[in-house]
Amino acid sequence: MVFLDVIVNYGCRRWLHKEDYTFDEGEVSSSSKPSQYPLLGFKDRHLEDDYLEYLVVASRARIILGYVTVILLYGLGPFLLYWPYYKESIWLQDLYRTWSDEQKEDFKEGRREGTFVKYFPNSTRVFLVIPCLLLLMFILGLVAVVCMYQMKRFEKHRTWIFYITPAIYLLYMAFAGFLFAYDPKVYNNFFGPVSWVLELIFVWASPLASLFFISLPALVMFELMIVFVLVFLVIVPLCNPAENLWNLVGEARDSCLIQESVPEYVYAAVEAGLLSPPPDAPPDAGKYEEMDIFRIVSPIILLCVLVVCVLVVSVIVDITNRQSFISKKIIDALTKQREQQLLQQKEDQENLIHSIFPPMVAKNLIRRQTQQPLKVSQSGRDFGFGDMSLVRSVAQMHHEGTILFTDIVGFTSMSQTVAPQQVMEFLHELFV
């Protein structure tokens, strides 16, 4: 989310914003969902911002776990491999500075081609400072992420985590590619010419296994995997200071074929009757060629499969997270609608009470309603107040009172000739 995300969310935001989706009223349904771009997120870019804020909060534990994992993998892997050579490198650099120019040239010519010491013998400390800086970078990244989750001042800026985390991994791949370029044959004595592939998988690529734990957006994972393939499988092997590392695969195949050729003494033992012939005669290195090629390239295939698995898992996780986000937005919208309906229903009930009873009685009933909920039928026509009787609810004590008995002259004939509404208005103006 460093380069591609800046281009997508800032450079192309205006062109990518194609709709304004809201989770209100009729749009809230399981069949109506916001449309999306492949890998780029929702077409409503404001909704995409809301999703990133939701994701960074929902992925808190996984992001912190990913940082802890990468610190352990890097500390027990690349960093631990370089640490024993720290004092030796310092001693070698100090010794190199005491030599004459002729001795320095002899020293460079005696070094293996493609090593850092051959090209930069006066800067061996820098070569070992880089692993320390990478470890410090991961630790500071973990501290920054924890602080952004804990401190309220960063509550509105937590999506920065999706910029900090991939930036740290990109810096790691850049520096790791530099270290790997000057030391790809360190295990040749143990695993042969293709040892650089095993070193790449088990040393430099092992910290990237922490990406399985971090729920980053699919676009971010796609960017990280592209950079990984370009750095470790294209740029470093093809532009290696020593030689093209991919040519070593052919050398390894030839060496395997030579080693697995059946010696002459085996044929002699078979002809003498001391050894039974092999099941497939005659044994020849050619029939093992395909098997040897597969054994040599199988680590490379495994590495490519791991890259594809990371991409597939990230896409599946991203789809699941987006579905959860949409479900949460729908539930929130339905809850808000229900709350509005309940408030409207309460307002209608209070208006009904005020239209039936005098103001003092209505206020008393509404006040008691807060203590014991009002029960309204589904039809909304009849209502009650729990187990309280109406008389007991509205009865009040008055120490002094006046009772008025009155008779309105001509009221009977008037009520028969005018509309009921006018009769009620007349009584209201008369007594209220």
Image (tube, helix red, strand yellow):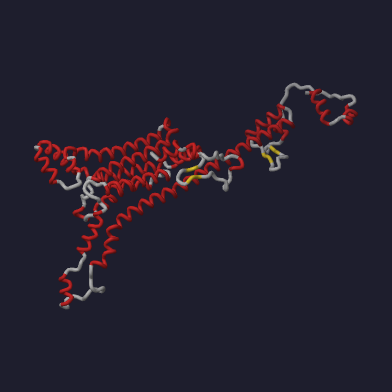
Q: Position of residue 198 (x, y in %)?
A: 26, 53
Q: Number of marks in the image?
A: 0
Q: Is residue 423 left or right of residue 16?
A: right
The one nearer the camera, 125 or 391, is 125
**Horizontal side, residue 379 vs residue 63: left or right:** right
Instruction: Name which quarter of the figure residue 134 lies in.
Output: top left
- Locate residue 80, reporting x and y percent: 24, 44
Q: Quadrant of residue 61?
A: top left
User: Could you tell me which residue is drawn at 30 percent across and 55 percent down?
Assistant: 299
Q: Is residue 209 left or right of residue 329?
A: left
Residue pictured at 57% horizontal, 48% vertical: 31
Q: Considering depth in this image, is 341 or 186 the residue closer to the camera?
A: 186
| Point 70% across, 30% down: residue | 362
**In the image: residue 222, left or right of residue 120:** right
- Which residue is painted at 55% across and 43% down in the image? 330
The one of 166 and 11 positioned closer to us in this rendering = 11
| Quarter containing the C terminus | top right
Place of residue 162 in the rendered image (x, y in percent of width and height, measured from the top left): 40, 39
Quarter occupied by the N terminus: top left
Q: Position of residue 319 (x, y in %)?
A: 47, 48
Q: Is residue 7 above or below residue 233?
A: above
394, 61: nearer the viewer? 61
